[in-house]
Structure formats: structure tokens, C-alpha cells
Image (tube, coloured by chain):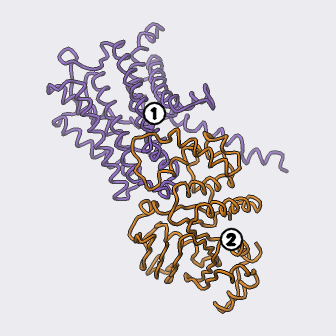
Chain colours: A purple, B orange
Amino acid sequence: MELATLFNAMPGNIAQGLLWGIMALGVYLTFKVLNFADLTVDGSFATGGAVAVVLITGGVPAPIALMIAFFAGVVAGFATGILHTVFGIPDILAGILTQIALYSINLNIMSGSANMAVNVLKYNLVVTLREIPHTIIISLISVAVIIGLMYWYLGTAQGSALRATGNNPAMSRAQGININLMKVIALALSNGLVALAGGMVAQYQGFSDINMGRGAIVIGLAAVIIGEVIGNAIFGKKMNFVLRLSFVVVGAVIYYIVIGVVLWLNMPTNDLKLFTAIIVAIFLAIPYLKGQARSSFRKAGKGAR
Amino acid sequence: MLEVSNIKKTFNAGTINEKRALNGVDLKLEDGEFVTVIGGNGAGKSTFLNAMAGVWPVDEGRIVIDGIDVTGLSEYKRAKYLGRVFQDPMTGTAADMEIIENLALADRRGKKRGLGWGVTASEKDRYYELLKELDLGLEDRMTAKVGLLSGGQRQALTLLMATLQKPNVLLLDEHTAALDPKTAAKVLETTDRIIEENHLTTLMVTHNMRDAILHGNRLIMMSEGRIILNIAGEEKKNLTVEDLLHKFEEVSGEEFTNDKAILS
């Protein structure tokens, strides 16, 4: 448990946090903007990884492979959107159905194998854990571009309609907004980002794995919520939209730094998911418990005879 | 012009909860006519407005707005022709969005929502002037979230939103019922002004008989999913609450038992 080991591991954790931050931005789009708990992401993250690795090993340049991974995610999100809007399946269930279907599809993409390697020595990858400073720079640029695009899009007339759909569907319909279309668009874009992140993470770690997306939604939520709590603590009412999006990524980075510390403390890797679930539960509970503390029956009943 | 002919709607048909909510409603509104709609609980007033708005499809009948048959159009498509204000102040606005964003959303009702900016600079100036006319100080809080406004302010804003793009028909569903009397009076005053200025064809549902008599140039009363009374012109101007109660008994053969309507 030497401190030096922890510090040596930090840049890697930051790089991973930034890459997962892209996926968290996708989760933000559905969970926060659309108010839709989308579980497709566990599947679409792995889809992104599978598509990217298969294409790169097949000779496609990595950036183009990532673009195609993005569109694979768009298709996955579209499927969930159709299940929800056209067939009336509740949001969580629609996401789970697509997610489980993607498990088979992802296996097929990787020709039946559960994982597939992509060697940085053989292929020209966008990011890799062998060159962490380079990875950090590339992922920072990617994050900045994505935040810029999201800021722009959500500020357009269509983006405003999307935000209104998440905020008040009844009002949106009365204002002539096709809320079903808006939901499908948001789900498609969100899963596109998630798959893009999956493709980058697969390159970073040097392989794609059928299980690489397991629990991705929880990590995404962790990033969104940790970022929100910390952002509000620092900036309070001055939080604007760009800061809000930036703190989603900050949340992902903090999450991976915490994971790094926990691993350094020799926690068995098997317990990581349990640990993650507990962190997310705590951060989800804090705002609720704070509200309860402010106005609770116990407080009101104080001094009762 | 609004032409409604023989609309029928039954909820939960074929079950023990079957409710014939609209029983053949006919109504014709000329351009600029402002009609108040009264009736007891369950008379079908709100159901009638929801039928116009396309919240669900009607079982029978036709709804024609300015020559366009909208009977088969879904709620969001029909929104192009309609301005709506709801009873619950929370329903008509997006609470987590800014005042100006809400106005811009409403300004694009019935138009394509593309990738141009959500709010343009010239729109900001226009909204500033319109908010100023509301006289609620909202023009200085244009970037405040609507969730911070009071119920009365939200209803006034929703009213402005509903009429930003001149609607072919304005539907007001007891839009002052959730407000305190003073605020309600102010919102009604604003309602009158906006309708007058824009010469809007309007249907206003209300629980309050006095409001129904005082506002608009025609009054209809509903009972059991039908229009049972239609009073316009001079007759409406001279109408009193007592007259109205008397007429109701005459037409329906029963006493008007809705205390809320009598007392308010």
C-alpha cells in the first residue's frame, strides 16, 4: 500500500473517468433531460465496443470505426424508443428488452466470441492505456466537443422541445410538440454517445468484452449524481448548463479516482460493483434525506405529550 | 369559426363504470365569439373542452375549425389551431425552463422546430413588451425558471403563451379555479383584454356563475353531456344568477344542486 503506487495509477484513473464521462453525458440526456431511466445503455455500451473492435481489426481506421459505433448505438436507442412510444412498453422495461436483445447481437457482431482483442502495436488506435497522457488529451478534446454540441443542440428550437418533453409532457403536447418523436430522438442520441464511449473504452483497454457494459447505467448515474452534488456545492445557483454538463464528466472522473483508491486499499475487485451500488445509493439518498430532515414528522412531533 | 356537430363520448364502454360523458353536443361559434360554459360537476364541461383539444378521439361527431376538419388529428397536431389554458397552473408551463424559453416554445406552436436557436434576439424584445403588458413584473425576470412563479403569474403567462401565435380557438378550462379571488379577478381581466385585442374565438369553462354572466358575449349551460341552455346578446347582458338558476330548473326539471357554483 505505498502512496507512490496510488499516484502512479491516478493518470490511468483520470483517463478512464474521462472516457466514461462521455457515456455519462449520454445518460444525462435521457435521465436528466428526458426524465427517462434508460437501461439500454448496458447493452449499447458493449455494442459500441464490439463494433469498434471488429471494424478496426478488419482494417477500418479507428475514427471511422468510432463513427459507425456511434450509429450502432443510435439504432439501439431507436429500438428502445419504438418499443416505448409505438408499443407502449414502460420505459424501464423497454430498455431492458433492448439490452437483453443486444447481448445476442453483440455476440454475433464478435462472431460468437465473448471478447475480442485489438492490439495497439498492430493497429492505429485513438486512445490506449499504453499512452495515458495522449489518451487524456484526446478524451478531453472529445468531451469538450461533445459538451459544445450538446449545449448547442439543446439550445435550438428542437432541443428546447426535447427539454420541454422531459419537463412537462402535457404542456408539450398542447404546444404542438410530437413528444414521441422527441423521446425517440433523445434515446437515439443518448445511446449513440454511450456506444461511442464503449468504442473508446474498448480501444483504451485493448479489447471488447460482451460484459463490458454490465452496470454501465449505474456508473453513468453515479457520474451524473456525484457531478451534480459537487457542482451545486461549489457553484450553487451560478450553475449554468455548460457547467452542469462539465460536472457530469467531473463526476465520472471522481468516480474512477475513488475506485482507484479503493483498489489501492486492496479491496477485492469482485466487490467493486457492490461498492458502486452503495455509492450511488448514498448519493441518490442524500438530497432526499436532506429534504426529510428539513421537514419531518418526527421534528413536527417534537415535544408532543 | 368553430363548428361542432353531434359529438359523443363514452368512457369505459361496456363495463359497470360506463359513463356517457358527451351525449351529442352541437355548437357553432362565429369568429370572435367569446362563449362561457357553465354546468354542475360531471356535466361534461371539461370533457367537452378535452374533446376539442384532442386529448382522446371522440366516438362520434365532427369538429371543424375554420373549415378544417380536425376530428382525426391527434392532440399535438391539433395544437396548431388551439390555444389552451388549464385549471392546474402547473400544467400549462414547463417549470424547469425559463420564462422566455416557455414563451419561445409556445411561439413555435404549429411550426417546424428545427435547428435554429430556441430564442432569437428579436423574439426577446417582443416578449419583453408583451410581459410588460401583463403588469406582473415578469419582464424583469425573463430568465427566471417558471417554477419560481406564483399560480396567478403562471396562469397569466400560460394565457400569453396560448395567444402568442393567434389561435383559431382559445380553450380556457376553469383557468382561474385554483387561484385566490383577487388573483382570479386579475387573471380574468387580462383574459378579457387579450381576447378583445386579438379578437379571439373563445370557449371558457367556469364554475362561477357570476363570471360566466360578466364575461363573454354568449353563455351556454351543460348538463349530462348536452348543451341545455344558450343565451346570447341582450338577454345575456341583462342576465342575473337568479335568472340562470331559474332557467336551469325550467330546462332540466331539477334543482341546480352545485353549491360551489351558487355560492361563488
Question: Do the residues bearing badges 2 and 1 touch, measured as CB atoms within 8 Å?
Answer: no
B229 up-or-down from B68: above or below: below
Q: Position of residue B161 (x, y in %)?
A: 56, 54
Q: Position of residue A34 (x, y in %)?
A: 46, 45
> Which mark, by number, is residue B215?
2
**How many residues crowd around disc 1 within 10 Å: few (fewer than 14), some, or many (20 or more)?**
some
The image quarter containing residue A204 is top left
Residue A151, disc: 1
Residue A293 vertical placement versus A140 (above, below) = below
Gap between marks 2 and 1, in whole Å? 45 Å
* Left or right for B133, reference A42: right
- Name the residue at 45% across, 33% down: A151
Label count reads 2
The residue lying toward the viewer, choosing from A64 and B138, is B138
Residue A226 visible to an observer of this rendering = no
Place residue A129 in its image quadrant.
top left
The quarter in which the C terminus of chain B is drawn is bottom right
Is A83 left, or right, of A264 in this rendering?
left
Q: Secondary structure at mark 1?
A: helix
**Amino acid marked by disc 2:** His
Chain name for mark 1 = A
Chain bearing tag 2 is B
Residue count near mark 2 (Cα–Cα under 10 Å), binned few <14, some 14–19, many ≥20: some
Please, what is the three-letter code of the amino acid marked with disc 1? Answer: Tyr
From the top left corner, tell me how far across and down residue A240 is, in percent: 55, 31
Q: Is residue A57 above or below residue A77?
A: above
Pinpoint residue B239: horizontal percent, then vertical percent.
73, 81
